[in-house]
Image (spheres, coloured by chain):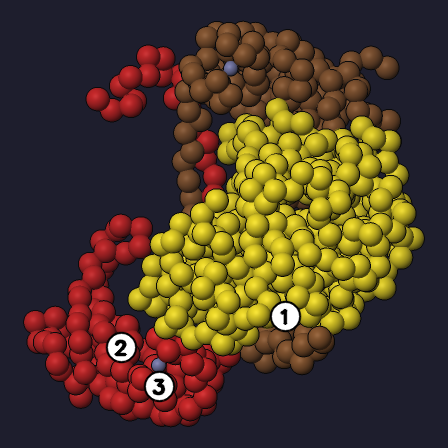
Amino acid sequence: MALKERVERLTQTKAWYGELPVESLYTAGIAGERFFRTLKDNGEFSGTKCKCCGIVYVPGRIFCERCFAPLEEWLTVASYGTLESWTVVYVGLDGSRLAEPIIVGLIRLDGASTVLVHRLGEVTPDTLSIGMKFTAVLKPKTKREGAITDILYFKPV
Amino acid sequence: MGRRVAIVGVGMTKFVRRAQETGQELAYHAAKMALDSCGLHLGQVDGVVLGSAPDSFDGVHMKGEYLSPGAGAWGKPYMRCFVGGATGVFSVINGWYYVASGLFDTCLVVCEEKMSSFQPHAQAAFLTIFDHTTERPLKPNLLWIFALEMNRYMSTYGLRKEDIALVAVKNKNNALDHPCAQIADKVTVEEILKSEVLAWPVQRLDVSPVSDGATAVVLANETVARRVTDKPVWIEGVGWALDTAYWTNRDLCYPRYVEEAARMAYKMAGVTDPRHQIHVAEPYDPFDYKELHHMEGLLLCGKGEAPQLTVDGVTRRDGELPVCPSGGLLGVGNPISAAGLMKVAELFWQLRGEAGKRQIARKAKRGIAQAWGDLMQVGAVVVVGI
Amino acid sequence: MNKEKKIEFPGTGLSDADFKEGRVLTTRWKVDARYTWDAGVAIGRYLEGIKKGVILGVRCYKCGRTMVPPRIFCEWCFRNIDEWVELKDTGTVNTFSLCYVTWDVKRIKEPQIPAVIEIDGASPGMGIMHLLGEVDPQKVHIGMRVKAVWRPAGEREGAITDILYWKPLEK
Ligand SMILES: [Zn+2]
Ligand SMILES: [Zn+2]
């Protein structure tokens, strides 16, 4: 039996409405600053390589989470890579139906050990398969602001 | 009581108003520094405890998971603990029982806070700690609770604001010698009494700041501790307790929950006469009166007597019972959980004689750290000794 | 002995200007977190009482406490409460503050006066948080006797704000 049915006097059920007034301002961080500056200024993807275990993190980080070693060696990886997984999203954040479904994919850029999550474009779901090659489509340089949205989407090569 | 547990390494970042580092990066710096300080590497850490205050400060939900790579938790047993402002000291208690129980030989304890993310001011995050139906419609302000408690404390014992302000003077001056301090200052009682009234009796300079920062400590069992250092700082007692969350039903004048936490820790540590057996104290000081409140709760003096000890200079670094030689939250800064853990780090340095210019004059073999939080009703206490 | 001096502590402090002049990259995000909080059984009944101009409390026969705000259990004895009782709409100021900043840290000229008010009819020390009004801020004192000022009956909505504020009981 639902809780509501057990309440004998309905006047007792009372709800209070409100919101959490939370607005956040995030810094990109030390590593993020370098990754997004490079993306903005050069249109390139930069990462850090751990000398201990060989992992190449993209976006770059200042430490290797596995070895706990500081990472100082920055390198540039390709702006294209392999589709590792994908999904088609039909509902928005509030649960409503989207007018146009969004395709989201995981891309492992050539030279990187880690994957990036981003939107896929210029492609239809029925033609997608894991292992396909995708390349980044960036905003024009003058419009870029040093954010993940400087990448518009990834398109098939 | 379980196996002996020692603190063998500590690390911390500077405490700043706004850090460029992300929370993960701050956590990494503190954790890495703590491990390096005792020559351990991550592979030698059996488990990781993370302490961090409300997610809304950093603006990252499930902050524990977000911070885990920087805390050194990759592939390890990892636990986040959270008791509001008391988190920093409670996290050590958390780590202690994993090692004391024999489950882990070593445990890395990391506390991080990035309060600057919250816009426009972290204070607004506290609106939702008040009861959503009976209190929040009155648009309460976190300062209310402190001001109400401080007023009750002052009125009960007939205390003067200038005596309470001496705590802020002492701590902000102590912090001048702390390399990580955010708001160290040669401030005077007059300046404090002239500072902006926020919520009388609380004035601007009675209050600790909003901060970003991280602190970490490494805990080890006796075998590991003896191997990695010749100066282990033993955790002799731990205690924690809380009072009702119906805060308006509580005795606002005396922190009974701190006393209960302290009694638990003293019993474990074999401390029967805290006033003489505790040589240095780092009680929680987000507001100047709270240091006094907490000294009383920790039984370091009688009820209402802490202000006089401060006036008499007993709590100065060259006094008989140095209190907050670090500079405390009032001087070093208040990245909530990291600030609580900073107090434990300070005792580590003080007892080992490594506190540099902050080194207290008297010989110290035992110290106490305490933090307080949740809806202002949790006490967490750690007694450490050499 | 002075090892501490040699330690380089990490951390990069930023200034307001670093943000304003865009020297560091940032992102901003506003969480859209809206809630419906249920008043619950005890507070639901409490609010019903308030709508009628009555402050309700609850009693536990075991410890003998009369509690307000009401709850369905005694947290000391950890058992159900035994009785609902009508309390007075008068009380005593347990403590108060004169607050010159709002919840979101905006400055105000005339202070708000939040107080913990021990309600007559409840056990000693049983207070609720509310605001004081119709009083010179400089004359408020601990121990002051106060009385609730209610919103007119027809305008009440069953909320804690149906009590507008508390004013001194006698001049
Ligand atoms: Zn590695
Ligand atoms: Zn009871």
Whole-number angstrom distance, CA of label 2 to CA of label 1: 33 Å
Asked if marks 2 and 1 touch (Cβ < 8 Å), the reply is: no
Quadrant, the C terminus of chain B = bottom right
What type is the residue that disc 2 sits on?
A: Val
Tell me what residue is drawn at x 60 percent, y 34 percent: B260
Q: B208 or C113, which is in the foreground?
A: B208
What color was chain B assigned in the picture? yellow
What color was chain C assigned in the picture? brown
Tell me what residue is drawn at x 46 percent, y 8 percent: C82
Residue B150 in view, yes or no: yes
What type is the residue that disc 3 sits on?
A: Cys
Q: Quadrant of residue B378?
A: top right
Q: Is mark 3 within 8 Å of ligand 1?
A: yes
Q: C32 or B353, which is in the foreground?
A: B353
**In the structure shown, which secondary structural element does the residue marked by tag 3 occupy?**
loop
Tell me what residue is drawn at x 55 percent, y 35 percent: B242
What color was chain A assigned in the picture? red
Q: Residues within 10 Å of mark 1 (few under 14, many from 20)?
A: many
Most distant residue in the left direction: A126
Which of the numbered marks, if any, corresponds to residue A115? 2
Whole-number angstrom distance, CA of label 1 to CA of label 3: 28 Å
Report the residue marked by disc 1: B14
Whole-number angstrom distance, CA of label 2 to CA of label 3: 20 Å
Which of the numbered marks, if any, corresponds to residue A52? 3
Asked if marks 2 and 3 touch (Cβ < 8 Å), the reply is: no
The correct choice, above or below, for A14 with respect to B320 in the image is: above
Task: Classify residue A72 as left or right of residue A57.
Answer: right
